[in-house]
Amino acid sequence: MQGLLMEIKTQNSHHLVTTADLNHHGTLYAGRTAEWFVEAGFIAAAKLTNPANIVCLKIHGMLFTKPALKGQVLCFESKIVHAGRTSLVAYIQIEHDDEVILRGFITFIHVNEQGRPDPHGIVINASTAEDIALQQEAQTLR
């Protein structure tokens, strides 16, 4: 089956860390981070297909390398790096001051009106060395 060939494109969104987003250590609560993380991945998927046909299947991990603090503005960079028959895998990284503080992947499923997996017809073309490496990593996720 010939699919719609799509180049990998990064989508950016931003969030300000406020007092309401903090945990008992005074750093960004992981649950709030997960909410924003999924939202960023969803935005990347929604740029490729109808948002009404996208559901989250699995968060493959959120690896924190540094805490986020109150008052920081975080940049969420998301992109779809792999497409299966019905799946779209997003890579998301969070940066503050040009430093990556979190990274991970999410798999979304393209569904029909009855909520059943439905082929999307998208093929992702990775052209840079970084995107090729992310695509290869995404292909190993289950």
Image (cartoon, rainbow, N blue to C red):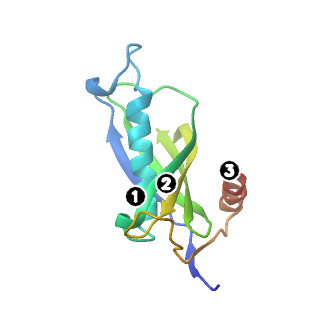
- The location of residue 25, given as percent across then percent down, is 41, 13
Residue that numbered label 3 is attached to:
141
The numbered dot on residue 139 is none
Quarter residue 69 falls in: top left
Residue that numbered label 1 is attached to:
43
The answer for how far apart the CA atoms under marks 2 and 3 are is: 17 Å
- Which badge, 3 or 1, comes first in the chain's sequence? 1
Front residue (pair 135, 119) = 119
| Mark 1 residue type | Ile
In this rendering, the label closer to the viewer, 2 or 3: 3
Is residue 87 shown left or right of residue 142?
A: left
Front residue (pair 52, 49) = 52
Residue lying at 39% horizontally and 49% vertically, measured from the top left? 39
For the residues labelled 2 and 3, say whether their Cβ atoms are less than 8 Å apart: no
The answer for how far apart the CA atoms under marks 1 and 2 are is: 8 Å
Query: Where 70 sits versus 83, above or below?
Result: above
Residue that numbered label 2 is attached to:
78
Is residue 30 shown left or right of residue 90?
A: left
- Which badge, 2 or 3, comes first in the chain's sequence? 2
Disc 1, SS: helix
Is residue 130 shown left or right of residue 41?
A: right
Disc 3, SS: loop
| Mark 2 residue type | Ser
Residue lying at 35% horizontally and 22% vertically, measured from the top left? 22
Residue lying at 35% horizontally and 65% vertically, measured from the top left? 52
Quarter residue 5 falls in: bottom right
Front residue (pair 86, 5) = 86
For the residues labelled 1 and 2, say whether their Cβ atoms are less than 8 Å apart: yes
Of all residues, the one furthest to the top in this rendering is: 24
